[in-house]
Image: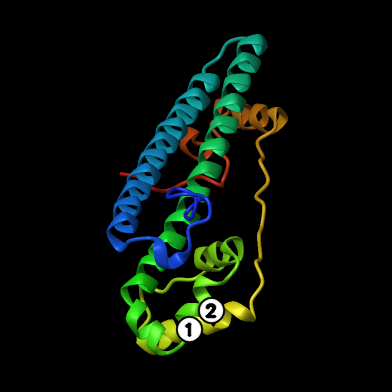
Protein backbone atom coordinates (compact mmCIF):
# COMPACT_ATOMS: atom_id res chain seq x y z
CA UNK A 1 0.00 0.00 0.00
CA UNK A 2 1.12 3.49 -0.72
CA UNK A 3 -1.42 5.98 0.59
CA UNK A 4 1.17 7.89 2.58
CA UNK A 5 3.78 7.75 -0.17
CA UNK A 6 1.91 9.46 -3.00
CA UNK A 7 2.36 12.85 -1.34
CA UNK A 8 5.82 12.24 0.05
CA UNK A 9 7.41 9.61 2.21
CA UNK A 10 7.10 10.96 5.72
CA UNK A 11 3.93 13.00 5.57
CA UNK A 12 1.84 12.88 8.69
CA UNK A 13 -1.87 12.15 8.62
CA UNK A 14 -2.78 15.74 9.42
CA UNK A 15 -0.70 17.06 6.49
CA UNK A 16 -2.72 15.30 3.79
CA UNK A 17 -5.40 17.71 2.46
CA UNK A 18 -8.90 16.28 2.01
CA UNK A 19 -9.20 17.45 -1.61
CA UNK A 20 -5.96 15.64 -2.55
CA UNK A 21 -7.23 12.49 -0.87
CA UNK A 22 -10.53 12.66 -2.76
CA UNK A 23 -8.74 13.07 -6.11
CA UNK A 24 -6.56 10.05 -5.30
CA UNK A 25 -9.72 8.16 -4.29
CA UNK A 26 -11.26 8.71 -7.73
CA UNK A 27 -8.00 7.75 -9.45
CA UNK A 28 -7.75 4.45 -7.52
CA UNK A 29 -11.38 3.60 -8.21
CA UNK A 30 -10.89 4.16 -11.94
CA UNK A 31 -7.67 2.11 -11.98
CA UNK A 32 -9.38 -0.76 -10.17
CA UNK A 33 -12.28 -0.71 -12.63
CA UNK A 34 -9.84 -0.78 -15.56
CA UNK A 35 -8.05 -3.80 -14.10
CA UNK A 36 -11.40 -5.50 -13.53
CA UNK A 37 -12.30 -5.02 -17.16
CA UNK A 38 -8.92 -6.40 -18.30
CA UNK A 39 -9.53 -9.46 -16.10
CA UNK A 40 -12.97 -9.88 -17.65
CA UNK A 41 -11.46 -9.81 -21.17
CA UNK A 42 -8.83 -12.39 -20.23
CA UNK A 43 -11.50 -14.67 -18.77
CA UNK A 44 -13.54 -14.40 -21.95
CA UNK A 45 -10.48 -15.34 -24.01
CA UNK A 46 -9.87 -18.35 -21.74
CA UNK A 47 -13.45 -19.50 -22.37
CA UNK A 48 -12.96 -19.10 -26.12
CA UNK A 49 -9.76 -21.15 -25.98
CA UNK A 50 -11.48 -23.94 -24.04
CA UNK A 51 -14.13 -24.02 -26.73
CA UNK A 52 -11.45 -24.04 -29.45
CA UNK A 53 -9.57 -26.81 -27.64
CA UNK A 54 -12.74 -28.86 -27.50
CA UNK A 55 -12.70 -28.89 -31.32
CA UNK A 56 -8.96 -29.58 -31.67
CA UNK A 57 -8.01 -32.52 -33.84
CA UNK A 58 -4.58 -33.45 -32.50
CA UNK A 59 -3.05 -33.87 -29.09
CA UNK A 60 -0.31 -31.44 -30.08
CA UNK A 61 -2.87 -28.76 -30.88
CA UNK A 62 -4.62 -29.50 -27.59
CA UNK A 63 -1.40 -29.10 -25.59
CA UNK A 64 -0.59 -25.87 -27.44
CA UNK A 65 -3.99 -24.42 -26.55
CA UNK A 66 -3.61 -25.66 -22.97
CA UNK A 67 -0.32 -23.77 -22.68
CA UNK A 68 -1.99 -20.59 -23.94
CA UNK A 69 -4.78 -21.08 -21.40
CA UNK A 70 -2.20 -21.60 -18.66
CA UNK A 71 -0.44 -18.40 -19.69
CA UNK A 72 -3.71 -16.45 -19.66
CA UNK A 73 -4.64 -17.83 -16.25
CA UNK A 74 -1.26 -16.69 -14.93
CA UNK A 75 -1.77 -13.21 -16.43
CA UNK A 76 -5.26 -13.06 -14.93
CA UNK A 77 -3.94 -14.00 -11.48
CA UNK A 78 -1.27 -11.29 -11.66
CA UNK A 79 -3.87 -8.68 -12.65
CA UNK A 80 -6.24 -9.96 -9.98
CA UNK A 81 -3.48 -9.66 -7.39
CA UNK A 82 -2.83 -6.08 -8.53
CA UNK A 83 -6.53 -5.31 -8.35
CA UNK A 84 -6.77 -6.70 -4.82
CA UNK A 85 -3.85 -4.48 -3.79
CA UNK A 86 -5.54 -1.47 -5.38
CA UNK A 87 -8.82 -2.28 -3.64
CA UNK A 88 -7.03 -2.50 -0.28
CA UNK A 89 -5.37 0.84 -0.96
CA UNK A 90 -8.72 2.27 -2.07
CA UNK A 91 -10.42 1.06 1.14
CA UNK A 92 -7.61 2.52 3.28
CA UNK A 93 -7.83 5.82 1.45
CA UNK A 94 -11.62 5.86 1.73
CA UNK A 95 -11.33 5.33 5.48
CA UNK A 96 -8.68 8.04 5.70
CA UNK A 97 -11.10 10.42 3.96
CA UNK A 98 -13.75 9.58 6.58
CA UNK A 99 -11.20 10.35 9.30
CA UNK A 100 -10.31 13.67 7.67
CA UNK A 101 -14.01 14.54 7.38
CA UNK A 102 -14.33 13.98 11.15
CA UNK A 103 -10.97 15.59 11.97
CA UNK A 104 -12.38 18.32 14.24
CA UNK A 105 -14.47 15.85 16.26
CA UNK A 106 -11.48 13.52 16.59
CA UNK A 107 -9.26 16.39 17.75
CA UNK A 108 -11.87 17.42 20.33
CA UNK A 109 -12.07 13.82 21.56
CA UNK A 110 -8.28 13.66 21.87
CA UNK A 111 -8.00 10.80 19.38
CA UNK A 112 -6.47 12.69 16.47
CA UNK A 113 -3.04 13.05 18.12
CA UNK A 114 -2.73 9.31 18.68
CA UNK A 115 -3.71 8.69 15.05
CA UNK A 116 -1.30 11.22 13.64
CA UNK A 117 1.48 9.78 15.79
CA UNK A 118 0.77 6.16 14.83
CA UNK A 119 3.18 4.09 12.79
CA UNK A 120 2.21 4.78 9.12
CA UNK A 121 2.48 1.10 8.08
CA UNK A 122 0.30 -0.04 10.96
CA UNK A 123 -2.19 2.75 10.33
CA UNK A 124 -2.41 1.80 6.63
CA UNK A 125 -2.91 -1.84 7.53
CA UNK A 126 -5.69 -0.94 9.94
CA UNK A 127 -7.33 1.45 7.48
CA UNK A 128 -7.29 -1.19 4.73
CA UNK A 129 -9.17 -3.67 6.92
CA UNK A 130 -11.87 -1.36 8.26
CA UNK A 131 -14.97 0.09 6.63
CA UNK A 132 -15.77 3.44 8.20
CA UNK A 133 -18.03 4.69 5.39
CA UNK A 134 -21.11 2.91 6.73
CA UNK A 135 -20.59 3.78 10.39
CA UNK A 136 -22.14 6.56 12.42
CA UNK A 137 -20.07 8.99 14.49
CA UNK A 138 -19.88 6.71 17.56
CA UNK A 139 -19.03 3.71 15.37
CA UNK A 140 -16.17 5.62 13.80
CA UNK A 141 -14.80 6.61 17.21
CA UNK A 142 -15.06 2.99 18.41
CA UNK A 143 -13.22 1.67 15.37
CA UNK A 144 -10.47 4.25 15.74
CA UNK A 145 -9.95 3.36 19.37
CA UNK A 146 -9.58 -0.30 18.36
CA UNK A 147 -6.44 0.49 16.34
CA UNK A 148 -4.32 0.01 19.45
CA UNK A 149 -5.66 -3.48 20.15
CA UNK A 150 -5.69 -5.03 16.67
CA UNK A 151 -2.96 -6.64 14.65
CA UNK A 152 -2.72 -7.09 10.90
CA UNK A 153 -4.03 -10.32 9.45
CA UNK A 154 -2.54 -10.72 5.98
CA UNK A 155 -3.48 -13.66 3.81
CA UNK A 156 -1.82 -14.68 0.56
CA UNK A 157 -3.84 -16.27 -2.20
CA UNK A 158 -2.35 -19.18 -4.09
CA UNK A 159 -2.11 -19.23 -7.85
CA UNK A 160 -3.68 -22.36 -9.34
CA UNK A 161 -4.38 -23.72 -12.80
CA UNK A 162 -1.77 -26.35 -13.65
CA UNK A 163 -1.45 -27.66 -17.16
CA UNK A 164 -2.77 -31.08 -16.15
CA UNK A 165 -6.00 -29.57 -14.83
CA UNK A 166 -6.42 -27.54 -18.02
CA UNK A 167 -5.93 -30.60 -20.24
CA UNK A 168 -8.50 -32.50 -18.17
CA UNK A 169 -10.98 -29.65 -18.69
CA UNK A 170 -10.27 -29.62 -22.44
CA UNK A 171 -11.12 -33.33 -22.66
CA UNK A 172 -14.32 -32.72 -20.70
CA UNK A 173 -15.27 -29.88 -23.08
CA UNK A 174 -14.55 -32.11 -26.09
CA UNK A 175 -16.68 -34.93 -24.66
CA UNK A 176 -19.51 -32.51 -23.96
CA UNK A 177 -19.26 -33.08 -20.21
CA UNK A 178 -18.23 -29.49 -19.51
CA UNK A 179 -19.41 -26.21 -20.97
CA UNK A 180 -16.48 -23.93 -21.99
CA UNK A 181 -17.97 -21.19 -19.81
CA UNK A 182 -17.60 -23.46 -16.78
CA UNK A 183 -14.09 -24.66 -17.66
CA UNK A 184 -12.38 -21.58 -16.27
CA UNK A 185 -11.03 -22.08 -12.71
CA UNK A 186 -13.44 -21.11 -9.95
CA UNK A 187 -11.56 -18.10 -8.61
CA UNK A 188 -12.91 -15.84 -11.31
CA UNK A 189 -13.55 -12.17 -10.91
CA UNK A 190 -17.25 -11.44 -11.50
CA UNK A 191 -17.06 -7.71 -12.19
CA UNK A 192 -18.22 -6.61 -15.62
CA UNK A 193 -20.28 -9.75 -16.21
CA UNK A 194 -23.28 -9.13 -18.49
> Please, is residue 18 above or below residue 29 in the view?
below
Q: Residue at x 41, y 68 (%)?
A: 14
Image x and y of residue 191, in percent: 38, 48
Query: Would you say residue 89 is visible in this rendering?
Result: yes
SS type, badge 1: loop
Give the structural element (helix, strand or loop) at label 2. Answer: helix
Residue 114 has which mark?
Answer: 2
Q: Quadrant of residue 78?
A: top right
Dot 1: within a 10 Å radius of its alpha carbon, few (fewer than 14), some, or many (20 or more) residues? some
The relative height of residue 15 versus residue 81 in the rendered view (above or below) is below
For image coordinates 49% across by 29% down, the residue present is: 46
- Taking the image as shown, residue 161 lies to the left or right of residue 180, namely right
Considering only vertical position in the picture, is 77 above or below 11? above
- Dot 1 corresponds to which residue? 111
Q: Is residue 155 above or below residue 151?
A: above
Q: Position of residue 68 (x, y in %)?
A: 57, 20
Amino acid sequence: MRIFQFKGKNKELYELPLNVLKIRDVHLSKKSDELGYEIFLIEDRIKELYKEAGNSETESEEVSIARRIESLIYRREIKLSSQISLENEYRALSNLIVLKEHENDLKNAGIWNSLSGANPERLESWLSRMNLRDKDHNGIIGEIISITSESADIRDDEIDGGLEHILKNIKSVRNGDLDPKNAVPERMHDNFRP
